[in-house]
Amino acid sequence: MIGHSFMGAVHSQAWRTAPRMFELPFDVDMTVVCGRDPERTARAAERLGWGDWADDWQQVVRRADVDVVDICTPGDSHADIAIAALAAGKHVLCEKPLANTADEAERMAAAARVAAETGVRSMVGFNYRRVPALAHAAWLVAEGVIGEVRHVRAQYLQDWIVDPEFPLVWRLRRERAGSGALGDLGSHLVDLLQHLTGERLTGVSATQATFVTERPLPEESSGLAARAGTRRGQVTVDDATAFTGRLEGGGLVVVEATRFATGRKNAVRIEVNGSRGSLAFDFESMNELHLYDAADPETEAGFRRILETEPEHPYLSAWWPPGHGLGYEHAFVHQVHDFLTALADDASDLRPSFADGLQVQYVLEAVERSAADASRWTSIG
Amino acid sequence: MIGHSFMGAVHSQAWRTAPRMFELPFDVDMTVVCGRDPERTARAAERLGWGDWADDWQQVVRRADVDVVDICTPGDSHADIAIAALAAGKHVLCEKPLANTADEAERMAAAARVAAETGVRSMVGFNYRRVPALAHAAWLVAEGVIGEVRHVRAQYLQDWIVDPEFPLVWRLRRERAGSGALGDLGSHLVDLLQHLTGERLTGVSATQATFVTERPLPEESSGLAARAGTRRGQVTVDDATAFTGRLEGGGLVVVEATRFATGRKNAVRIEVNGSRGSLAFDFESMNELHLYDAADPETEAGFRRILETEPEHPYLSAWWPPGHGLGYEHAFVHQVHDFLTALADDASDLRPSFADGLQVQYVLEAVERSAADASRWTSIG
Amino acid sequence: MIGHSFMGAVHSQAWRTAPRMFELPFDVDMTVVCGRDPERTARAAERLGWGDWADDWQQVVRRADVDVVDICTPGDSHADIAIAALAAGKHVLCEKPLANTADEAERMAAAARVAAETGVRSMVGFNYRRVPALAHAAWLVAEGVIGEVRHVRAQYLQDWIVDPEFPLVWRLRRERAGSGALGDLGSHLVDLLQHLTGERLTGVSATQATFVTERPLPEESSGLAARAGTRRGQVTVDDATAFTGRLEGGGLVVVEATRFATGRKNAVRIEVNGSRGSLAFDFESMNELHLYDAADPETEAGFRRILETEPEHPYLSAWWPPGHGLGYEHAFVHQVHDFLTALADDASDLRPSFADGLQVQYVLEAVERSAADASRWTSIG
Amino acid sequence: MIGHSFMGAVHSQAWRTAPRMFELPFDVDMTVVCGRDPERTARAAERLGWGDWADDWQQVVRRADVDVVDICTPGDSHADIAIAALAAGKHVLCEKPLANTADEAERMAAAARVAAETGVRSMVGFNYRRVPALAHAAWLVAEGVIGEVRHVRAQYLQDWIVDPEFPLVWRLRRERAGSGALGDLGSHLVDLLQHLTGERLTGVSATQATFVTERPLPEESSGLAARAGTRRGQVTVDDATAFTGRLEGGGLVVVEATRFATGRKNAVRIEVNGSRGSLAFDFESMNELHLYDAADPETEAGFRRILETEPEHPYLSAWWPPGHGLGYEHAFVHQVHDFLTALADDASDLRPSFADGLQVQYVLEAVERSAADASRWTSIG
């Protein structure tokens, strides 16, 4: 595993837990974790349960005792690490977004294609697909339960930078993060809505906003938290992005990603309206899926609050009895399960692939181009 | 009152009830109702409690025993009736949207300006302003409770035409209705979001969709219900409209109006995120306002579900004890109260004015122009 | 109508509105309202829309131009007025609870039986039966949708006397009100749960509490509001009552009525669990019924939030289009409709009858006896 | 660890995870797991991550390499194992309820007292105390935020035996389980409500029901699931228990525990109304606490939906960023943290102690005695 802060901690919990709760086709050995700061990396290895630590990722991705490389670093290093790992014959699980630019993502997708010819596989970590309620939702759409998709409204709402004195952490700098709310949050929505509907976006019209243009430089940061210093710098990414779009089947899509939705901490919300029913989800109540089935008797129709905690629901048979909900990290456990199972069984199940990640990148770039060009409709692909 | 179908029935209930629940500055005499079909109009007068009926609105608006003309007809007749009534010296309450085109609305606003010089007043019936929770929300924003507005997301979701065999009623024909979801539903959202924030939209970028382009012609219709015939015709309005926009203060706005949100019957939803707090409302729970106050202690902050049923809430002291909720029609009772009170007290309180209604019309036209021009950003006013 | 404060105002709104929204078998003439204070009664007549006023109910119930007597006074006068009215050949609609004691209620039920022999009818005003969601719920249980009833949990939660300085209004004095939360709130729950399940309570075990035993005497009161004076008096009723019970079919019932549930204004909540499904309702969201149907596919089962605003729902075809909710007072409009319709059609529909009201009284008395006897199980009738 | 089915799996996940997410005063070595069936126990050790396995708990509790014994067996074996382990000088963490009878619980509490004199400690596993929202709720009550407690209504609703053909598993047999819904579910509520309020129950009046008295004997069972055979046997425990009670401070308590609440999977609900505010919780939305603060301005008061996912909330600083919720198992991770921390720091924090567990047992016995004696009020302690 490369990287050991927020995402590294979540992935570690997933690697530790998956073999305990699921039947997996491989034994999991948490061989080595890699970071830039030796001291902090050594501590992380100890705390997170890795057998070894290192500070040079280029060596790590070539180690003979490594079969899988899990990339949990910021987006600007994804391309280099992933391409090197694939070249070294290691399977790669790469955090989202695939890269900071479409150019990097193209190189990664190309490398993945080449590697696949020799059986070396890759996947992008859009974890929300593996939330049981959302996996169930995708299944219901695919089964035709809600009919043709007419509307998708998707929002990813956070509020951690509402305070103008919150410091200028790396996620607010274009050179590290690629973009702001768009890449960090919007990429999840783009992957999710395309995954749920089984349709791709064909065009978008976008508006972006940066409400606070200058912030104190951080003195120290950890995860999403940081302490402000006295000097200031320019915010070079979007605080919020909104766009409308259309799906291949004609559905109308409205997407909004923001870090300025005061009071909303991590609200990933998606509603899909179809010709025969609707689905709604909010990550603030992540164990619930709301389903409206227009086939119900007219007087008894209503959104059903399905508790996604029954053994028949996706992934749930591995966990606790009915009604005992899961949390944020469980989607990552499921990701490990799906990744390893697909490695053993059928590589075509290794979705989202790097090609999928690249297509998301194309959407993000179209959004940025549209926003920069007076919101003009911008086709994708 | 001109018109006596759905809106006429609601307005009648409001005129009957307001004097019983509120202290009003004038006695209310429900003098005459006017409709095109004599027989149906006579029945409506009897049922709805009007003293007389008529089938010629031009005579009605000139009657000496009429002081106020309440216009409840489809949008294509608003301009003619309102202008004639104002010219005859009658105060006018006109249903929304003010008109089907900005041109008509301009003529109405001009007539209203002229009439006002002789003390003849006018108001547009954007009833949602008078829902207590929303009146309270506007007050909270004006008091600065949520600080500067960063985001507005507003949706008006219905589903009554999801079935492609639902007939081509007048609301689906451009020549009668002006537009589809945009004018009927979106106009409410535009008025509401500008009213709540106290800021006007400065520009928009829009996308419109018509999912079902041909429908059976109706044989008979009443309210929103109708029976399909065998011949078919073209749907000439939008089934759904989505747009992004910016407010004067820089806030990012996302609006969606649709009649294809399966399972959503009349969901008027609005959320406003400010620098110090947030507000959220859904008409499906119309007696609730959700307020997030960032000044609350960090561990105890959360969206408060305020039941808008206390005597201290707007309009509530006139009604029932705490906890006894109101319904849809009550906003119209409050509209009558506010209209008559402002007539007696201070005409500047007669809001939304025809000028306000015209400005909404400008927004709607900008939305349509943007949608017709590849979603290009379109400035307003 | 006898009485013109809170209940009188609601009933007046119902009498005014019912003929405008429903087809009724009789014309409604709001002939005369009666109260103790001439001046206030005259004002009430004017404001509420009654043709005449009076201060002697004994004359009123004998007036030749009166066909129906609507009793909206406190419980201690119900028996005298109702018995006199029935004796005078007037149909009677009497507010709940039927009386303050079972003895009074027995005399009323006897009078009702005698009157019925000459076609003079009577009904008790348990209005919650006429909330559309609850009427629908009763229909669903009767249709067998949820199977055999296993559980009922019913709560009526208010908080208007949490403050120990709230004055000792008549509702807190046994001689006027009969009991406290039990009779005022619990009587609604008893009627409602028996009506919904179609089963009677066979026994109860109860606990009662009076948290604040002394309060300032009121100087003036109106509705539920009052101003405290300086002298103090004893609270002689229960602040809260809780009881367990069993239904004829073996179902386990848990009931709680209180005026000390801080933050709950008028929360009438009822959940019924059956062998094949469940129903849940909360008056704070009065236009919703929640239905769990165990016959739904296992992975898609969940409580459906049914918006009770469709034309197919009870009473709704008379009102507004789908999604446009009703309020507290509408149950009273429906009560007028049902009362008059049953008078014309089939007197057996005149439910809840005085006999039903008497049976509720028996339950309330059993609750009080049990509470006074160490919660010992107490059988009912 | 003794026992390795449902509870054993959850505890294992907790022992594995706690050292990775929290700073603990001890290293955790998962030494040995013990079960009756050697083959299944060996498989469990492998899967759950235990270093060794055994089939004789009497040897295990004496092993020199064991410092802590974690008891996850059915209630009938708790006393023997715990007393032996304490006698052998091992700290004990024992699943709830402490025992099947008060007699057993008394012997355990006595053993715990004796052991404590030599520094050997013990704790009962009432895990719901360690759900962050409930830990926060207890803190808020202790801080006086809601004032004096007037009401507690607590429900634990499941539905896994609604089907009369569900087999007669050990949880439905008195000799193994002690009681039914009462001990399994009600014990959680009793501990929780006393913990939240900081007050003990002084008396109860109870009603119990067994709706299905005969069931097929099981052929095989695992966790809560089982397969029915053809022979039948008697259900010897309660399907549902309801009781009213009073707290030391006079608060009125209503408790209901059932396995027949169709559609409710694991709904642990508790609402506490105090003189200055209220708290409400539902495990179906376990990351939320609802707080009503009567000190809020009257027009802005409402139940706040606090997302218990902020770093300032109990236990949360060890986990993910704001808004990323936890699941069922996390309360067990917190239990391990609290247990080990208190072992190192201050044994008086080792709550709930065996004495606490015994007191819960006294309440359960009082409930059973009351139910058996016509619901007569039964004092506790």
Image: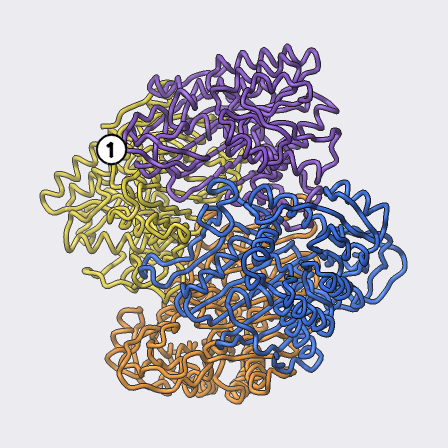
Chain colours: A yellow, B purple, C blue, D orange
Q: Chain of mark 1?
A: A
According to the image, label 1 marks what residue? A248
Q: B93 left or right of D124? A: right
Q: Nearer the viewer, residue D146 or B285?
A: B285
Secondary structure found at label 1: loop
- Residue at (49, 61) in percent of width and height: C138
- Residue at (38, 56) in percent of width and height: A306
The vertical placement of C239 against A213, above or below, is below
Dividing the picture into quadrants, the one containing residue B159 is top left
Task: Count the labels in the image.
Answer: 1
Could one spot residue D94 in this view of the protein? no
The vertical placement of C159 against B196, above or below, is below
The kind of residue tagged 1 is Glu
Could one spot residue D16 in this view of the protein? yes
Q: Nearer the viewer, residue A262 or A2?
A: A262
Residue neighbourhood size for the residue with mark 1, other residues' Cα within 10 Å, grouped as few (<14), some (14–19), many (≥20): few
